[in-house]
Amino acid sequence: MALSVRRRVNTIGIELLRGAISPSSAQKGSAKISLLFQLSLLLLSVAATSSGAAFDFPGKVGAWPCPPEDELVPCTCYADDDLNLFLGCQELESISDLKAVFTASFQFKKFFRLQINDCNFTEGTLTKDIFEGFTFREVIMFNNKLNEVEVGIFSDSVQDLTFFEFSDPIPSFPLSNLESFKELRELVVDINCDQFPTLTSDSVLSFSLHCGGTNVTMETSQLNMNALTTLHLHDSNLISIGPENFESQSLNILTLNGNYLEEFDPEVLKFSSLLKLDLSDNLLTDMPFITGMAPKGTVRIADNKNLKQLSLDTTMPLLDADVTIHAEGVSLSCDCNLRWLLDTDGTDLLINKITVNVDCEHEEDFSDIRDILDKFC
């Protein structure tokens, strides 16, 4: 943009100069002097507004088209080589300070990224009028001591926002009008949800939600995201999950580790072509019923301290589908319940697709499943 402006001004200047010295325009010496003087003023004006500080070094803090630095302190504005605008605000003392920043003389209100972190916003609500007229492609907000976010925040960015990250112990979802954001691709949210929010989006590809509440339940069809490929719900205090929440045909990765899940309804863990499923560090007592894993996929059930067995009916279909099972840190029962892992001759294990570090609760030490089977079968 800067180069095109300078080229256009230079062209105008050359044409003016040619007219000033051509015979047809040289009727009077005073007229030539006046025209040359006007040309000089024009070129000086352009040089002042398109100097090296503005165009040659657009990544410099405070460079055009950012407002003067003293209008934004303690926030910082800068532009990259393509004049994409970035605005960062840290350690603001109040929401009023944030409002004051957005009254600065921004020549352009279309930003690539807004980042606000480590601020003290305990006294009020983050209202949508603060960002009215501004659009953002990426928004990152964390550790701002917020209590509430008004419905419709960032509504002017519904056609622009592609990445949103938010972390603060508010009780409601920060983008309550999520379905309005047509270009949103990645969503990372850490809030204090007492229950799982109902969310709808046809555009989000990757979603990570961390719930800081207690005894969080995920009911039927609370997650309506048909384009999802990656879903992270780990460490979210989940105690139960209803069916029809993981029906996205595109889902490749699902993490549910670090929750309080004891069992699953047979209709819950049904996929189309899932590559990675992490159920580790929960309260499982057996392998749950899982269908639709992709060949060469992996299922992690590690560190489920209550897991005592791997039932034939739920485990063998995964092995038949060429799925690898990681079950490190479990305490399998010291009995013959895993006899089905031996072939018909009772000599070879079908264990090559199951990784287990045995912690058998028995007075004798057993190094692996083979030792248990030799002892009890």
Image: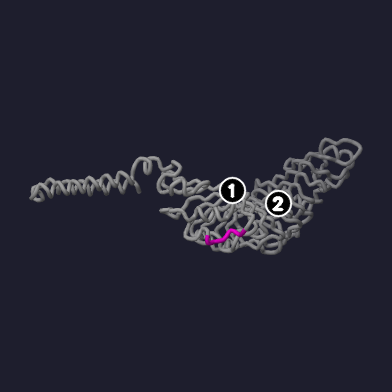
Q: Which residue is mark 2?
A: 256
The reply to whether the magenta stretch includes residue 152 is no
**Residue 1 pos. (x, y %):** 35, 49
Q: Is residue 201 left or right of residue 80?
A: right
Stretch in magenta: 124-129
**Residue 179 pos. (x, y %):** 57, 63
Q: Quadrant of residue 330?
A: top right
Residue 267's place in the image compared with 332, above or below, is: below
Q: Secondary structure at mark 2?
A: loop
Residue 349 vs residue 170, the one in the foreground: 170
The reply to whether the magenta stretch includes residue 127 is yes
Residue 221's place in the image compared with 231, above or below, is: below
Q: Which residue is mark 1?
A: 117
How far apart are the alpha carbons under marks 1 and 2?
Answer: 28 Å
> Which residue appears at 50% of the width and 46% of the height?
76
- The amino acid type found where label 2 is placed reads Leu
- Residue 94 visible (yes or no): yes
